[in-house]
Amino acid sequence: MHLTFSMNENMAEKAKRINPFFEDYGTPHDTVPFDRIKVEDFEEAFLEGIRRNNEQIEKTINNPEKPTFDNTIISAEEDKDGYYDLLGRVSTVFFNLMSAETNDEIDALAQKMQPILTQHANDVRLNKRLFERVKYVHLHHRRLSAEEKMLLDNCYDGFVRSGALLDEEGKERLRTLTEEASMLSLQFSQNLLKENKAFILHITDEKKLDGLPDTAREAAKQAAKEREMDGWVFTLDMPSYSPFMTYSTQRDLREQMYMARNTVCTHDNPENNLDICKRLVNLRREIAQLLGYKTYADYVLKHRMASKVKNVYKLLDDLIAAYKPTAQKEYAEIEKLAKKAEGSTFKMEPWDQGFYAHQLQLKKYNLDAEMLRPYFELSKVIDGVFGLANRLYGITFKENKDIPVYHPDVKAYEVFDKDGSYLAVFYADFHPRKGKQGGAWMTEFQGQWIDRKGENVRPHVSVVMNLTKPTDEKPALLTLGEVETFLHEFGHSLHGMFANSRFESLSGTNVWWDFVELPSQFMENYAIEKDFLRTFAYHYQTGEPLPDDLIRRIVRSRNFNVAMGCLRQVSFGLLDMAYYTKKEPFTDDIIPFEKKAWAKASILKPKKNPVTCMTVQFSHIMAGGYAAGYYSYKWAEVLDADAFSVFKKNGIFNQETAQRFRDCILSKGGTEHPMTLYKRFRGQEPTIEALLKRNGIKRKAKES
């Protein structure tokens, strides 16, 4: 069912009705009652949640007893009786919907509530009396377990990193900076969503569809039909954009699509993000320097495995050194094919690269994403991914239609452990739509913790994606890349579902951000494993299994343009670090700064050098949690390749190895240092060797 967004209840109904956030949900596993929630419920619950939060804080700081770990730290972490934690309860639902199913009313409410919520967060972190109790416990505490010690350290450090040691003038300045940054991050996201959804390419001449496969044409026809338009409509959502750029023979239309996607939020309109990005960079630099750090990157990396700026740059530089020679050869091979097709004077532009790379892939491997789609029907992929989890960990999934969902696209499942006990609720939201951000992510509607009575409160996790939609003619048929996306987000969800910590703030994916991508990227390894593909990849019409020959071609082509892909990720990491290692105010023009920042990872030299911009749509580092942390994807890739090498050695479905991975990493959350957890599983620290071997770089380097 959809959320009910009516704002016109009459007064009598309103007087009788109880805000769903204020009572037991009365749903299976106490899941969110989306079918009963109205937009106006959020503001009321936010304000009451803040009031209750303040009430509990007053109770804590006025406690006449000497501060202890139990009456100060534990009281804040474990008091989850549905009263004190109302603010967390409503915030989780609201901000998840902001990303997955927003509308004008929710956007307007977010603008209203964001400064109030930021002010409250500052009030808590800058509460002198509360910090004094935490500080006392930090200096004088009973013997603690490793998990308790981690909680205490995080709590104390959280106050310090939020300004608790500043003088009053510094605290007031920090309030101003954080409140402005919070509002600008929200505005950035809202602008990006509006700009991405505003563009369509409307085609009425069928000749302009030349080169496009049937799946892309059918999806475009469906998109036009939904808008009550004739012909075909293409959008900037990846299931529409990517096939167009890969297959369309219409170079002028590819350029139009490319420029539309890569100039969002740069236009002279209210959705322009250029000044917002510049201001965000400066705000974060000033916040870090106010707290005693040279740069924002130094501030962030204190709680990362990389630990220092120089270590991040070493990783990025090592990857450039290892991959750039191969990437240059890959690009030259594409360019050679393009020139052969178009003439020696042809100059390849960014909107040509995907098209001619696809032509080269066909030539080298006789492989095409469309050849595989019929074998990746969504319901079968779901069976395959769930089956993989069952084979590794013994868990099972059962759809429960009594669990409310926030949109008809969303499916809700109960998850059961190998002994049959209830493990988690799992939501899956598959397709793009108007009120949904692009990309893919995992989130939670309820975390995991063990309450004071000893009950293990199980999590409600969700994966949100933008996969190919079904049409009137065909079910949802995915690309191999979309299967990998599903596996990636599912890996995050396993990290959440297997959580088994005492404290919610340390459970599941509450780990350092250059460790959080290990479980997700680890799962991607299975996408090309024959024994996994054999479990679900059957033709949606004939029922025939994916042919061995196609599987061989998939495996052979695994590293097609892998070096170019690596450098693309490295370039984003360089851009991120360029912004957040600034010691002086950032005054540069963003577009030329961006191109200079990632120049050493770039191999493209377009003739037109179009005025495009990544920064203004780079949600990870502007509105997400990856500011000064985008390198994490490559950092974790080293970990995932190293970890999967153990499975390759012992058997990719080896349950003993899987159980060790679950016990040492997936269930532990952030209860110990990530490297401690990793070494407990692996027996040693990771090296880059497994990644270089997997990508064929080590072998290629020897050959050259």
Image (tube, rainbow, N blue to C red):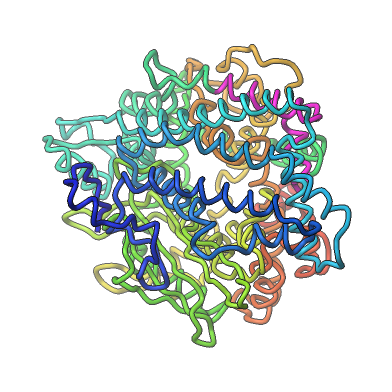
Counting from the top left corner in percent of width and height, residue 300 is at 72, 38
Quadrant assignment for the C terminus: top right
| Residue lying at 73% horizontally and 34% vertically, measured from the top left | 163
Magenta part of the protein: which range? 277-306
Counting from the top left corner in percent of width and height, residue 619 is at 52, 35
Classified by dominant secondary structure, the portion drawn in magenta counts as helix
Q: Is residue 650 left or right of residue 119?
A: right
Residue 318's place in the image compared with 452, above or below, is above
| Residue lying at 59% horizontally and 34% vertically, measured from the top left | 621
Q: Relative to the observer, which residue lies in front, 578 or 114? A: 114
Q: Can residue 674 be seen in this view?
A: no
Quadrant assignment for the N terminus: bottom left
Q: Is residue 486 visible?
A: yes
Counting from the top left corner in percent of width and height, residue 514 is at 69, 49
Where residue 425 sits, quadrant-wise, is: bottom left
Q: Is residue 641 left or right of residue 680?
A: left
Asked if residue 283 is among those painted magenta in the image, a careful observer would answer: yes
Q: Relative to the observer, which residue lies in front, 461 or 447? A: 447
| Residue lying at 81% horizontally and 29% vertically, measured from the top left | 292
| Residue lying at 58% horizontally and 19% vertically, measured from the top left | 278
Asked if residue 157 is among those painted magenta in the image, a careful observer would answer: no
